[in-house]
Image (cartoon, grey):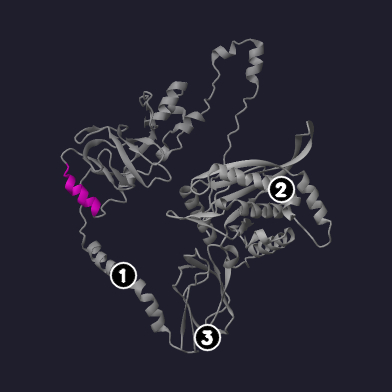
Amino acid sequence: MAEIINMPRLSDTMEEGVVATWLKRVGDKVEEGDILAEIETDKATMEFESFHEGTLLYIGVQEGETAPVDTLLAIIGDEGEDVAALVKGAGEPVKEEPTPEKTTETPKAETTEKVEMPEGAIVVTMPRLSDTMEEGTVATWLKKVGDAVEEGDILAEIETDKATMEFESFNEGTLLYIGVQEGETAPVDSILAIIGNEGTDVDTVLKAAASGNDLEEAPKEEKTAVAEKTEAPKASGSESSGGRIIASPLAKKIAADKGIDLAQVKGTGDHGRIVKRDVENFTPVVQETPAAKVASPSTSEASSAPVVTPFVPAGEESSEEVKNSQMRKTIARRLGESKFSAPHYYLTVELDMDNAIASRKTINAIPDIKVSFNDMIVKACAMALRKHPQVNTTWNDATTTYHKHIHVGVAVAVDDGLLVPVLKFADQMSLTTIGGQVRDLAGKARNKKISPAEMEGSTFTISNLGMFGILEFTSIINQPNSSILSVGTIVQKPVVKNGEIVVGNTMKVTLACDHRTIDGATGAKFLQTVKQYIENPVTMLA
């Protein structure tokens, strides 16, 4: 009998999965324990093992595709078995709902009659005034219905997601209709206003726009220009032999201040419009005059020198969009939730590392033993958590959970982001055990072989960037933890010992705390205890 295999939940926070690789194909024999596929979760790429035997009859999620947890992933059954009913049954809840919407909307689109756009009428739509603008708010209308509109007049001031911009018209006529009132917000490309001949029937224009008539041609006829709002007086546009000079108000103002003739400036904006950067980058052409010929010999020699054109960097702008991995999306979501829900504060202390360096050298002199400074930090924090249970907590709104166990997470950088393997009951481990466990879990994390169980349940987290030469930094709390320790590099510098200035080795650590569970004095006392352990490592062995 055919068995439906759904997208599994491979971690406690997994909502959807991506099939990285199928290791079986349709028609292949599947034994219990075979690896069906590699699935990318929000934490790692995991091998998905089959608990059924038979033939792989159907694949519901192709390689590279994403599917929510519990959706149809595959079907395993007897060779030749008909699975059409199972596939249809699994897909019915998804397929039935959109169908009525499509069948009801299509006839409406087909039965809409085309309405002819009245001659001279121009539909002005909400412009996209920035690359990220999705909607705009009309701050002020500078023209009212019935007003005459000349080419170059400012129609309105529009508030975007970045600034308030002046919206300039290059059409002439009468303002017949305002579609977005002052203070109202409308999406980009919605009807903002209508300009045309006086007496034009506005209803006919609106019907023509709704039926799609001239919707593609209108943007070609409509020429608009925008400029950053400024309180400075606007320079009036000048006339050239070829007609009106198209320039933004800000460009006109800068040109007037610098005494630049806009007729000599080449515009790089839409429709050859002169914008701010064109005026600022403009280099006037110097022509020799009779007065220059009567100059002194030294002046003549100087003027005969070649004119050095200032270097203007140029190139082609390019960007590339890369699909976010499940891990990256989860990092963004969880760290965003932590940063904006937990009130963070930070405590920094500088540690004297001379004794720690000497102790590590002695320990590592023993054959087959390797201990790092990070191992010492893990051990010191685990022991300090036992003395300060308030730091080993989780905030739950109505209650605070005090964890009796001590599980320390150690942040590990991987190609796709960041993983946090967890050392369970770290306070009971020796330095050598901690070192071995960290190396083993970090290797699994980097090779994508770590299991969800090995990354769950932390009550405290350590992030170490000392190996990159970072002096100090702050971290975002890895919820549901209440704190995280950021570890910097060891530096040599002058320090005062016994009243004398000597060369010492120091290291800065910063504790980020959730103020809902850990008060400032509590966090400070915890750091004092960590400092005592690190500066006197023998106390961790007592």
Residue topped by disc 3? 55
Residue type at tag 2: Ile
Q: Position of residue 37 (x, y in %)?
A: 56, 74
Q: Is residue 67 above or below residue 216?
A: below
Residue type at tag 3: Thr
Residue type at tag 1: Glu
**Within 10 angstroms of label 3, few (less than 14), some, or many (20 or more) residues?**
many
Is residue 201 found inside the magenta-colored segment of the image?
yes
Q: Is residue 16 left or right of residue 462?
A: left
Q: Which mark is residue 534?
A: 2
Q: Is residue 498 left or right of residue 295?
A: right
Of badges 2 and 1, nearer the viewer stands 2
Examine the image and state in which quarter residue 193 appears: top left
Q: Which mark is residue 314?
A: none
Kind of element beneath mark 2 = helix
Q: Which mark is residue 97?
A: 1
What secondary structure predominates along the stretch shown in magenta? helix
Q: Which residues are magenta?
A: 200-210
Seen at 38% across and 75% down, the residue is 91
Of badges 3 and 2, nearer the viewer stands 2
Q: Is residue 534 above or below residue 494?
A: below
Do the residues bearing badges 1 and 3 touch, measured as CB atoms within 8 Å?
A: no
Q: Position of residue 73 (x, y in %)?
A: 48, 75
C-alpha separation, residue under disc 1 versus residue under disc 3: 32 Å
C-alpha separation, residue under disc 3 versus residue under disc 2: 59 Å
Q: Which is more toward the observer, 122 or 416? A: 416
